[in-house]
Amino acid sequence: MAKNLAMVKNAAMYNKQAVNVMKNQVMENRIDDSWRAWIAENLMLGGLPIHLAQILQSKGFSLGNASEEIEKASRSPYLQGARRLRNRVAKRDWVLDIYRKLSHLQNHEIPRRHQLSREEFLQDYYSQNKPVIITGMMHDWPALAKWNLDYFRQTCGDAEVEVQYGRSQDQNYELNSLAHKKLMPFAQYIDQVEQAGQTNDFYMTANNDGRNRQALDVLWQDIVQLPEYLRADPNQRGFFWFGPKGTITPFHHDLTNNFMAQVMGRKRIHMIPAYQVAQVYNMRHCFTEVDGLQIDYARFPNMRDVRIQQCEIGPGEILFLPVGCWHLVEGLETSVTIAFTNFLWDNDYFSNYPPDHDF
Ligand SMILES: O=C(O)CCC(=O)C(=O)O
């Protein structure tokens, strides 16, 4: 059963998708367990019994049967338990909404801080779950001067690498990332990036890191870990993102705090604070169906309440992406980013992540 797009607030928005899925069963004209689940779900959303009965009637059930079933569900002690849980979630949403409302009083610009000290970073950003752009901390990276497509060809062009491929044909290319992995010589990928102009069809991402770590080993000699903020850890060096102009990483959140250290090209990042999770239609794991570049407000009305922050980063700049913060990333030019998660401070938000990802 597809999950609902909205919480109680959106009670009018019944689960239409589920209605379509179950069209076939209507032929038999009986209310079965999947329809019962639909009734329960929509009662929990705050749907009025009479409206639910009318929808069932329009699907071929008799009004009497529908009303009886809805009445039975409403009285069910099982549903009383679920109602309590729903109320508890609504209370937590209310608390999160305090942060959302207060955030409207804040300056929306992502601050740029030159050579931010460890302590300031910890106190003002890491521990506050707030993004920041740090400048002036990559000046000793050989990569900044050396990296370009020819250098990549010369140093590891023969290596076999893994990339995400064939993304244009699949709306859910991030959710289905496993299906888009493809192996090719690095030199061939570099040629494609060079010739592409603008495309989102292929992208070497952190999802390919397991395979590429060894293949691109030599490039890591040009990177200096950032000791002001990161642990030296030979097993956790960072993640290599390399793609053409036009790549789009759709809205999602990470389960770690994250640095995006920009080496080549520019990127635009759209961010939504983590406490707005109730408004972003999180359906599966850390993803949303909302297209952040073309938001359909009729389908996703809660997005009107969402505060989206935007910034751009270029070579030598580091964006701190706080854990849980929703982000969408656009490659504005051929671009290379190194992402890090090995911070000096606790960065385990995975152990207590809900095990069932169907939200
Ligand atoms: O650079 C990108 O395209 C996406 C980066 C990202 O989403 C991340 O590091 O979590």
Image (tube, rainbow, N blue to C red):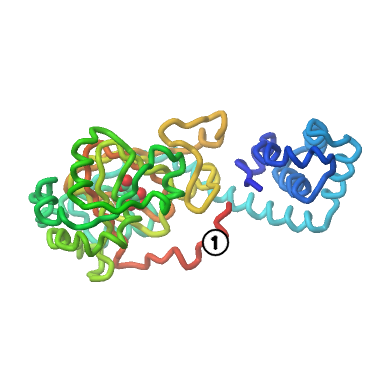
Tell which of 275 and 140 is nearer to you.
140
Pointer 1 residue Cβ closer than 8 Å to ligand 1? no
**Left or right: 114 with respect to 127?**
left
The residue depicted at 80 percent of the width and 38 percent of the height is 27
Please indicate, yes or no, whether residue 42 appears anywhere in the rendered image.
Answer: yes
Name the secondary structure under disc 1. Answer: loop
Q: Is residue 17 above or below residue 120?
A: above
Residue sticking out furthest to the top: 298
Provide the residue designation for mark 1: 354
The residue depicted at 44 percent of the width and 63 percent of the height is 349
Q: Position of residue 144 (x, y in %)?
A: 12, 50
> Mark 1 is on which residue type?
Pro
Q: Quadrant of residue 62?
A: top right
The residue depicted at 71 percent of the width and 47 percent of the height is 41
Label count reads 1
Dot 1: few (<14), some (14–19), or many (≥20) neighbours within 10 Å?
Answer: few
**Left or right: 90 with respect to 246?**
right
The residue depicted at 21 percent of the width and 61 percent of the height is 215
Tell which of 22 and 236 is nearer to you.
22
Q: Position of residue 275 (x, y in %)?
A: 48, 49
Residue sticking out furthest to the right: 64
Q: Position of residue 251 (x, y in %)?
A: 42, 43
Tell which of 351 and 112 is nearer to you.
351
Please indicate, yes or no, whether residue 321 appears anywhere in the rendered image.
Answer: no
Q: Position of residue 33 (x, y in %)?
A: 78, 51
**Left or right: 138 with respect to 275?**
left
Q: Quadrant of residue 169?
A: top left
